[in-house]
Structures are given as structure tokens and as C-alpha cells.
Amino acid sequence: MIDETKNPPERRDLVKEAPEGGTMGVDPRSLDWPLAQAYFGQPKPLSRVIREKCLDCCCQVQSEVAKCTAINCPLWPYRMGTNPLRPKREARGIAAKK
Ligand code: SF4
């Protein structure tokens, strides 16, 4: 439930001064999520988040994500927006979608 008495967070609410100097991001677990969704949007599957990061990494060029050779990047197996390490639906005993 969104508290309409509060404003959505702004960047300055999410990045603070660090005790040792410089800046630091706040712990996202401390955010008021109904409000934070106004900044970040609705929650999305992590596979989509990874895909978005890979597109960001490749200047939004899909073919470059597909051709990525950085196999030591932890996101590499997931860069196409799916989890290829997860057993297929049939192997998990779930009927295929029609
Ligand atoms: S897998 Fe490739 S495209 Fe994705 S973040 Fe890593 S280096 Fe970038």
C-alpha cells in the first residue's frame, strides 16, 4: 500500500554520504518498497534483470549480448534472459505450455 503522504524516493534518498567519505548506496533491504517501486518500477524476474544488465553492458545491442565471449562473467550463462542451467519443464514433471 503506497503511503501517499510520502514522496517516492529520489536518487539522493538512495545514495548517501559514506562514514569514511565519498558516497554509498543504501541497503536496499531497508527501503520502503511500496515507495521504492515508484522509483524502480514493479518487481521483475531476475532473468529479465540480468538481460537488462547485459544489454546495458553491450550498449543495448542485442546481437552483441548474443556474441559475448566473457565466459568468466557470472552473468554469461543467463545473458539471453533464461536460465539454461535449470532443468526443462518436462524434466521437472510440469506439462509443456500449450
Ligand atoms: S555476460 Fe557478457 S554481456 Fe552480460 S554482463 Fe557479462 S560481459 Fe556483459
Image (cartoon, grey):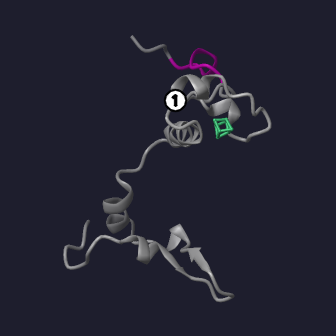
Q: Is residue 67 left or right of residue 59?
A: right
In the image, farthest residue toward the right: 72
In the image, farthest residue toward the front: 59
Residue 83, quarter of the rendered image: top right
- Residue 76 percent location from the top left of the image: 69, 33
- Residue 6 percent location from the top left of the image: 25, 78
Work out whether 37 lies above or below 5.
above
Work out whether 27 lies above or below 76.
below
Look at 58% across and 15% down and name the residue there: 90
- In this view, the residue in front, 37 or 56, is 56
Q: Quadrant of the C terminus?
A: top left
- In this view, the residue in front, 91 or 21, is 21
Work out whether 48 lies above or below 18.
above
Look at 58% across and 36% down and name the residue there: 58
Q: Is residue 3 left or right of residue 97?
A: left
Q: Which residue is mark 1?
A: 61
- Residue 15 percent location from the top left of the image: 50, 74
- In this picture, which residue range is highlighted in magenta? 87-94
Q: Is residue 90 magenta?
A: yes
Look at 59% across and 75% down and name the residue there: 24
